[in-house]
Image (cartoon, rainbow, N blue to C red):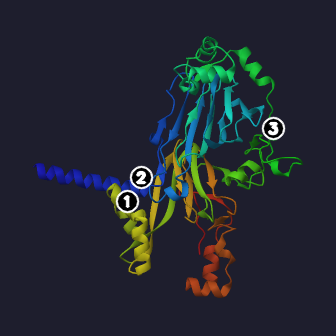
Amino acid sequence: MALVLLLSLCSSSLALMASDERSGSGSGRPYHYGEERFRQWTTRSRQGRFRVLERFTHELLEDAVGNYRVAELEAAPRAFLQPSHYDADEVMFVREGEGVVALLSRGKRESFCVREGDVLVIPAGAVVYSANTHADKWFRVVMLLNPVSTAGRFEEFFPIGGENPESFFRVFSDEVLQAAFNTRREDLEQVFEKQSKGEITTASEEQIRELSKSCSSGHRGGGGSSESGSSMWDIKPSSLTSKRPRHSNSHGRHHELTGDDCPQLRALDIEVGLANITRGSMMAPSYSTHANKLAVVVEGSGYFEMACPHLSSGSGRSSRSQRLGRGHGSREEEEEEAGPPGRKEEQEQEGGQKSRGYKQVRSRIKEGSVIVIPAGHPTTLVAGEDENLAVLCFGVNARHDEKVFLAGSNGVLRQMDDAAKALAFGAQKEKVDRVIGAQSDAVFFRGPNSRRISSV
């Protein structure tokens, strides 16, 4: 009886896993990070929280994005964030709300009013304090941090505070501090160690008005590098969402900020994009030629699929029915299929004993999910049937990047000449042209569950 029950449980588990594979709820390892992979950087309180995604330490990701960290800030209405600096360059995107951000850098203070859709680059070492200027709405920010001291690790330094937060001045000797500030120790303690309410506190309405008085909205249309007299560190927010979409139709729109729009992004070799995909729609399969993408879901849900190369001892390619019919293996098995250790792969490639194949990486995504998309890896995003899907993308190593679309009216395969089509496809030219030319939309299409298929 126990054996029968065990076999029944195993059979049910395998069926459930196969169903999950078909519905797109796979793990997506090691390219997909769920919300649970974030760690609290500060103690969560009624005033807000700051959390950081774990490091990208997997061998398939470390070389591409291992030096970067993704973080999220949430600040309650009228919350004030204590002055501090990071040993990391920061690219921040305001996903919700409005606030004021003050930078103390290069001998001056600059304050900026930022709102939903804005992007601001903060250089490493700049002392920053900020506040949520809205009386009712939360202020939510997504950040990409590029550490400059230790690869993949950054620290926050507070000049002011008691025990929470602790001021870094507390570790200096009394004689050094008294000489540096030309002030008695007692006076220093009364000033630097009085604040102990935490890293995020609440400001009064009057204090918020005072903080907002001197702030500038900067140049909101992007294109900062084209302005006369603009310099590398002429810091100002740029609006990602007020720019004309790079691609747009009824199924979605895509906004983008590059180094041509913002000199600070060019210096960091980073670009920022935001794809809003209409519910039930999808983004065309595509890849980036140079940029490795860190994609953060900021709204909605759906799933992604990516073709990941791997070495196999068989034909190098499993059939669609085989992919859908098998369940999930162990974590080690999934990661092995996604790509074996680098040195082993190099040896097998040199020996020529293995054939090249592709692993389908697929997983459900929702608000808070993070996806790593390496350069050259064909990927698609599909929005759920009930809500739109908004995905923020930080592209690193972006200076010479080009987005290559594989399907649609701007699909790269349409550019092939007739002789190459005959040689590559092995089918009649008319048939090939009908198949690769059937999709009349560009970049954004009807999704798999709502598409109308043309007869070819």
Residue that mark 2 sits on: 27
Q: Nearer the viewer, mark 1 or mark 3?
A: 3
Residue that mark 1 sits on: 334
Residue 308 can be seen in this image: yes
**Alpha carbons under labels 3 and 2: distance apart:** 42 Å
Name the side, left or right, on which 184 lies relative to 221: left
- Which of 271 and 441 lies nearest the eye of the viewer? 271
Q: Of label 1 and label 2, which has the lower sequence position?
A: 2
**Alpha carbons under labels 1 and 2: distance apart:** 9 Å
Q: Amino acid at mark 2?
A: Ser
Residue that mark 3 sits on: 218
Name the side, left or right, on which 214 lies relative to 29: right
Verify CB contact (< 8 Å) between mark 1 and mark 3. Answer: no
139 lies above or below 256: above
Q: Position of residue 68 (x, y in %)?
A: 56, 49
The residue carrying pointer 3 sits among few (fewer than 14), some (14 to 19) or many (20 or more) residues within 10 Å by Cα, namely some
Verify CB contact (< 8 Å) between mark 1 and mark 2. Answer: yes
Question: Quarter-wise, where is residue 347 in the image?
Answer: bottom left
Q: Nearer the viewer, mark 1 or mark 2?
A: 1
Q: Amino acid at mark 3?
A: Gly
Identify the residue at the far right of this view: 228
Q: Residue at x 41, y 72 (%)?
A: 311
Secondary element under disc 1, as helix, strand or loop, is helix
